[in-house]
Amino acid sequence: MNAKQILMSVFFGIIGGVIAFFAVQAISDKPSKTTSQSAEHTLIEAYKSPEHYAKQTALSSFGNNAYPDFNEAAESSLTSVVHITTQYNQTNYSIYDFIFGTGPSSNRPVTSSGSGVIVSPDGYIVTNNHVIAKSQRMTVVLNDKHSYTAELVGTDESTDIALLKVDAENLPYMKYGDSDEIKIGEWVLAVGNPFNLNSTVTAGIVSAKARNINILSGQYGIESFIQTDAAVNPGNSGGALVNTDGQLIGINTAIASKTGSYVGYSFAIPVNIVRKIVADIMEFGEVQRAYLGISMADIDAKLAKAADIKEIKGVYVASVIEDGAANKVGINAGDVILGFDDKPINSTSELMEQLSKYRPGDKMKISVRRENKIRDFRVELQNKFGNTAIVQADKLDELGASFQSLSDEEKRIYRLRNGVRVEKIYPGVFMDNRVREGFIITSMNNQAINSGNDIRNVLKDSKNEQIYMEGLYPNGHIAQYTFTIE
């Protein structure tokens, strides 16, 4: 084959390849134009849309930065949360003791533990009242393992708050946050000493606010807990609930559990309540509690129908006390409270929480609905005695007992001219000195006792002096006790 024939073969080969290429392209282009072009266009437009962009951004954020950084909040909180151990003597009585009125059969030391939060550099520590109840000795161990003996400054059973003091300076303390500003779904840390595991941090979110779980006994118990799913167990009580800025927003107090251990729900006292209780105890030695002078109820469908309330919202005023704070400005039974100090109110626990942050004499705006009209009232809050004076600490409370004067029939049965019966014993001087319920006090420091006020007068006149108390138990056993009230 000569050169000319070779060149001709190459030329026709190239021409054939070009023709084949374009033929294949023509065939493959037809289905793409009829079936996939519109799908491709849809995907591109969806990607360009703001909704798609937002989804992509959210997914990217979740993958890289969805969880907050707890390191700084945890580190600053751990140094301010302490381990509290308490000790008291458990008195045990036998049937023989109760029948014959003799002394206890045994007396053994009991220890327990909890947590606390340092709230000032000079050694003031907040914890739960139930952590230190009954205790005769309290030891505080800091995160750096320094140990101190603590003194009880004051307690408030209605909020389950206690304030302790240790003799130390320049302690690392936790700054107060604002519990009114926290939001449901916000990340929080629980810091404490569960099961004696010192300096434990758990994380969760705020699950609910203003939760009432009916654990605080007494007529004036205030429950408006922050509910979280941060793990809290025995030993966490009195510890800190902390926001991501490392600020104190609550005192961990309780769990909802049938086993005694954490199963998903924990509850903390809002720090705005704690801050006011602490300030009152430090300044007055007694909590200055404000009252509206009303009885109230949460509004549900049943009450709304019975009271002809159009909207299930607010707190129902069931009754008002004559000359009480609400009554004086014209708030009536049947009114519905919608706002307190410009904060919306939708439950009795929310209203009690707001009230607990103020003192008698404070003037607050209260918004109510009456006959489908909104009315605002300026109310001057009162104390439990119906005035605005500062309430001083009552020495009678230090005894840790409630009293009932004897009836004439009881005096005849026991052959007494006077006497006051000890109705109930709770942590205090009487418990420490093993006074039992049912004891009838006939005299204190040789003064006849006929009422609780008689006891109060003896205590007032006997500061830092020994008090000698005489009386008898219902079985006829005569007993004497000696104690001191500071």
Image (cartoon, helix red, strand yellow):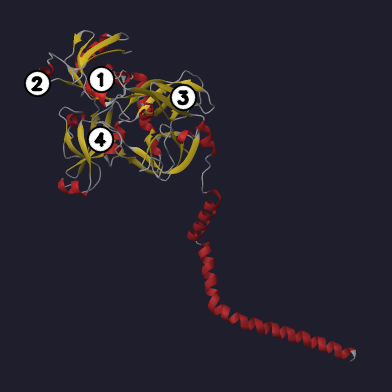
Q: Earlier in the sequence, mark 3 or mark 1?
A: 3
Tag 4 residue = 366
Disc 1 designates what residue?
389
Are the residues tagged 3 and 2 within 8 Å (C-beta)?
no
* Residue 38 locus on image (x, y percent): 52, 74
Nearest to N terminus: mark 2 or mark 4: 4
* Amino acid on which the number 3 mark rests in the picture: Val
| Separation of residues labelled 3 and 1 (CA atoms) | 36 Å
- Label whose residue precedes the other's in the sequence (2 or 1): 1
Closest to the camera, between mark 3 and mark 1, is: 3
Q: How far is the residue under mark 2 from the one under mark 4?
A: 49 Å
Q: Name the residue tied to disc 2.
A: 409
N-term mark: 4 or 1: 4
Q: Secondary structure at mark 3?
A: strand
Tag 2 or tag 3, which sits nearer the N-term? 3
The disc placed on residue 140 is 3
Residue sitting at the far right: 2
For label 4, count other residues whose C-alpha is less than 10 Å away and answer few (under 14), some (14-19) or many (20+).
many
| Mark 2 in CB contact with mark 4 (< 8 angstroms) | no
Instruction: In this rendered view, identify the residue nearer to me: 78 or 89.
Output: 89
